[in-house]
Amino acid sequence: MKAWSKQQIRWGLMAFATFWMLVVVPLSAAAAPYAAMVMDARSGEVVHARNADTRLHPASLTKMMTLYIVFEAVENGEIDLDTMVTISQHAASEPPSKLGLRAGQKIQLRYLIRAAAVKSANDAATALGEAIEGSEASFARRMNRTAKAMGMTRTTFKNAHGLTESGHLSTARDMTILGRHVFYDYPDYYNLFSRITADAGGRTVYHTNRKLLRSYRGADGIKTGYTRAAGFNLVASAERGGKRVIATVFGGQSTASRNAKVAELLDLGFNRTPTRVALHRPQPPAYMGKVSNGAPGAYGKTVRLATAAAVKRSLRPQARRLAEEAPVLLAAKDDIEQAVLAAQQASPAVSPVAKPAVEAAARNDSQLAQGAAAATPRLPRVNPEPRPADLVLASAQEPASDPIQEVVTRVSTSGGRNWGINVGRYPSEYQARKILLQTALNEITTLDGSLRKVVKRPTGFDANFMGMSRETADLACRRLQAKKVTCFMIEPGGGA
């Protein structure tokens, strides 16, 4: 065999390097085309889009949908955060990134959630899908049903983790829509995506996107993804000055270049979006649960089916039946005329100009009353119980010598809406009122109907929401705290 000279070896290596640069590198780059989208999360308005509807490999961005369905299952009672999940051989054999779970191992559901959200562990994602639906294939079908209900029209899921699989595709637009749903539909869980580290069952895991979370002011999630076919993907969300922007990138060339591009897109979003904008939350998809013909779930819990066939009887209350010989309802005509006459006598005289209008209104009311009386069914006359002789009104009570006499006052019927929440203390009343308005707009679901109240203190002005039930106040605080807004509850009598 003829020996190769050093010169020939050198030329051979150069030829191979040339082939690699001209053929292999372009092919790998072509496998991960670039796509991007920027959205104002408050309104859903698109700020920037490039190749946003091109179907590409989402990689671990898939886990946003996996976790969304897990949150949905927990909130609807399909499974509990403390449920012990047995790891299957299929889940344990998933390639990295992984938590290192072993077949037959038992681990709480909450730790699988943390591993999938923070470390992007593939074995944890598969185990979550199997825990909810019994198999990864069934879980993928549920992922697709949920995606369709969200309006993700160009997405097809084949697995729970996002590793490359034929037909497992999505778009920058669809993943931005999904990220927005994760933020608004499950705010109590959203803080998972901003944790730099987390305890995953005795093992500390580190966030796959901790560099951007630490370097970009206001960034608090959401999910990274990488495979050779997908490139470096990221859906990021950040909040500054009351604005929230979501930016999505597909096909980044490296972690550093992807993070730099996402930071550039987030800056673009904050620069282009208005400060004041009406909040339009996305409509959560209808809960469909586990479609298994009513069979018990994987862990023995019967799952409610969201189908019309599951409704066996109406829960609408039945109308009260009237007695057959109920007395005839007296016509209201005479009562109305007497009331008008009494009002005229008790009030100042009606001017000649207004008198015809008053008389016409009385005639109209009388005619309406006659018609209503003719069409009204017979109802029993209910007379109020006479007032006990030993009770007097508070307004009529005078200092009395009789110590036994009692005073009756009206009992509050507010339904326990005497709780409140505090969202901070500010140096001026103007700043406190401004924060109250911004908070009310950003958390309209739980704060709707509450009273905005500024209380002056020696060290500043407290911004409070009052007139809430204890449950509503607790929910509002938890939702605000998930958005990193300072909040604590105010007990009855503590908000003055």
Image: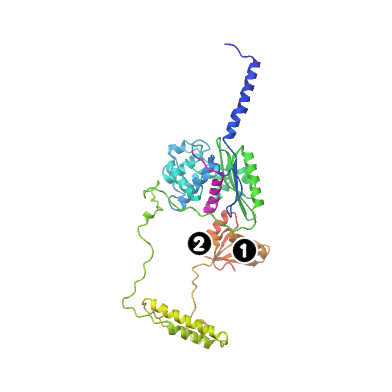
Q: Quadrant of residue 420?
A: bottom right
In the rendered image, residue 175 lying in the magenta stretch gets the answer yes
Q: Quadrant of residue 250?
A: top right
User: Which residues, given as a range, are shown in magenta?
Assistant: 167-189
Q: Element under label 2?
A: helix
List the residue tagged with mark 1. Answer: 463
Quarter of the N terminus within the rendering: top right
Please report the residue visible at 53 percent of the width from the left and 83 percent of the height from the top.
Answer: 357
> Looking at the image, is mark 1 or mark 2 earlier in the sequence?
1
The amino acid pointed to by label 1 is Ala
Location of residue 433 with respect to 410 vertically, above or below: above
List the residue tagged with mark 2. Answer: 471
User: Looking at the image, which residue sits at the far top?
Assistant: 1
Number of numbered callouts drawn = 2
Residue 158 % position (x, y): 47, 40
Residue 483 % position (x, y): 58, 54
Please report the residue visible at 31 percent of the width from the left and 76 percent of the height from the top.
Answer: 324
Residue 148 % position (x, y): 48, 48
- Circle 2 Cα neighbour tier, 10 Å, few/some/many (<14 / 14–19 / ≥20): few
The answer to whether any part of residue 318 appears in the image is: yes
Q: Element under label 1?
A: strand
User: Which of 460/210 is in front?
Assistant: 210
Location of residue 21 with respect to 402 vertically, above or below: above
User: Which of 438/36 is in front?
Assistant: 36
